[in-house]
Amino acid sequence: MKKILLITAALVILLTPLNKVANAESHPQEGLQEQIIYQILIDRFNNGSRTLSAEDDVDNPYAYQGGDLKGITMKLDDIKKLGFTTISLSPIMKNAPNGYHGYWVEDFFALEEQFGTMEDLQQLIEEAHKRGIKVVVELVLNYAAQSHPLVSDASKKDWIKEVEIEQTPATGWLESSVQLNQENPEVVSYLLEVADYWMQETKIDGFKLHAADQATPAFLEALTAHIKKQNPEFYLLAGVLEESSDITSLRENKQIDAVENYYVFNTLNDILIQADEPIADIYNSWEKERSEKDLLFVDTWNTARFSNNFAETGRNALTTWKLALTYLYTAQGIPVLLQGSELPMYGPSFLESQQMVQFQNSDPDLAEFHERISAIRKQFPALSYGEYSQIATNEGMSVFKRSYQGEEIYIALNNDSESRTASITGIDADKQLRGLLGDNLVRDNGEGEFKIGLPRETAEVFMVEPNEGFNWGLIIFVFGVFVLFIIAVVLLSKKDKQRQK
């Protein structure tokens, strides 16, 4: 029987499919364009230290719930397995009571005690780096808590001004905030010191500039130039507080690496929450507001969850998230996923969107797709750096092309409630398209066309490879192995019976 087991093991090895996907090691992951960002609201992620829970009030959605830095460190392996390469943390500076969101800053040079100690932060960063994960921290430089000492300092009256934007339920924290006067040179110097402090005291990889659309452009130019002078590789992401803000100056700032694109966010939510809406509309909206600096996302802290939006129209969670992730991970831009999206989490308003992550409700199939689509993005540089164009449409189906240094990747998404086919040209007849999600195979039809067919509400990513037809040598070899295996089993069985007699 040992011989049979050995033969079986050899057979399994021989029949294991060859990996046709490009080797990720050939293109080391360095630039921001290659990153897949996981956005974390620290207080609402994971409780890793019960000793920090004195101020927790799990029944009050406006109070601390217990998430901390140790809780994030405990989940780093899971984050890495899902394919995320950067974590973006909510603000970490010391806040006024119940400032779980991080926007009521009382001390710009201290860590919020509810989240842990500086040692906890350093350990998180160190453990993340060991796993190849970068750490970005949201930096609040526009606002401070009304209880901040500088507000009551008579000598600093010209440091403060009234909050300029209209509040919404999701931005109710502004009611207890003041806005910093970034036209005051002293304020500018102070805020540059804040940035220097966190860069020097930690080994973080970047800042997400909170409410960058509300900052003074001249201040942002001074801040970003100052940071990049110290570390040109330091990531600078621009957050947007008001969806209607003009973000032209943020995109034109050469030091800012990426900016949130709410125009595409809204279009994604409009199109993908229901079947039969054309994928082409997403591309058209991107073309109107296109930028090489786009941060692409379908969820925010301040809105209903994407999962909740499509659940209300009766769409299947796994099906819809496959479409959304395929678009986010293959379009031009940097994908950003909100914590809990991988489960997925639901919520009709910002309060539910900011609930503690319910890890126990995870969907293994969705998690597996996260791993698969992120691996594809990492393995093909064209999906990070390539030119991006829509090359075919048919009702709710679109086919996109990404090309980079001779590498071509084709992405097909069908948002229709029935199967669709789209034809593409420009591919050599001796080539074929190999699907990486569903293992589909598309060849030239003899007329210079490659007809891509997709079932309803599905997506596929294709690589281009030589058309070698049937590999008869491999087929004959595998067949021979099966025959030898059967013969060996029969002979060994006969010998066992003879020994028993």
Image (tube, rainbow, N blue to C red):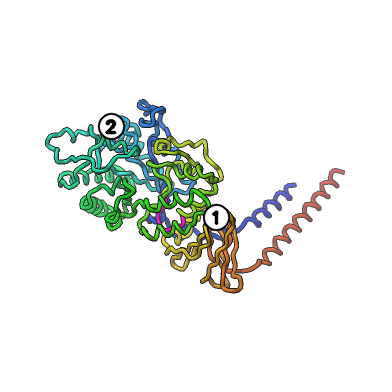
Q: Which residue is mark 2?
A: 96
Residue 196 located within the stretch drawn in magenta: no
Judge whether residue 191 can be spotted in this image: yes
Residue 331 located within the stretch drawn in magenta: yes
The correct choice, above or below, for 64 with respect to 365 in the image is above
- The residue at the point 33 percent across, 51 percent down is 235
Q: Is residue 259 left or right of residue 492?
A: left
- The residue at the point 54 percent across, 44 percent down is 314
In the foreground, 284 or 386? 284
Query: Alpha carbon of mark 1 to alpha carbon of mark 2: how far?
Result: 49 Å
Viewer-side label of 1, 2: 1
Magenta segment range? 329-335
The correct choice, above or below, for 137 with respect to 283 in the image is above
Residue 178 location (% of width, % of height): 23, 38
Q: Quadrant of the C terminus?
A: top right
In the foreground, 116 or 146? 146
Q: SS at mark 1?
A: loop
Residue 89 location (% of width, % of height): 36, 42
Residue 287 falls in image quadrant: bottom left
Q: Is residue 145 left or right of residue 132?
A: left
Q: How many marks?
A: 2
Q: Tell me the tag on residue 6.
A: none
- The residue at the point 68 percent across, 67 percent down is 472
Q: Which residue is mark 1?
A: 416
- Judge the density around disc 1: few (<14), some (14-19), many (≥20) Cα neighbours within 10 Å: many
Q: What's the amino acid at mark 1?
A: Asp
Judge whether residue 370 can be spotted in this image: no
- Judge the density around disc 2: few (<14), some (14-19), many (≥20) Cα neighbours within 10 Å: many
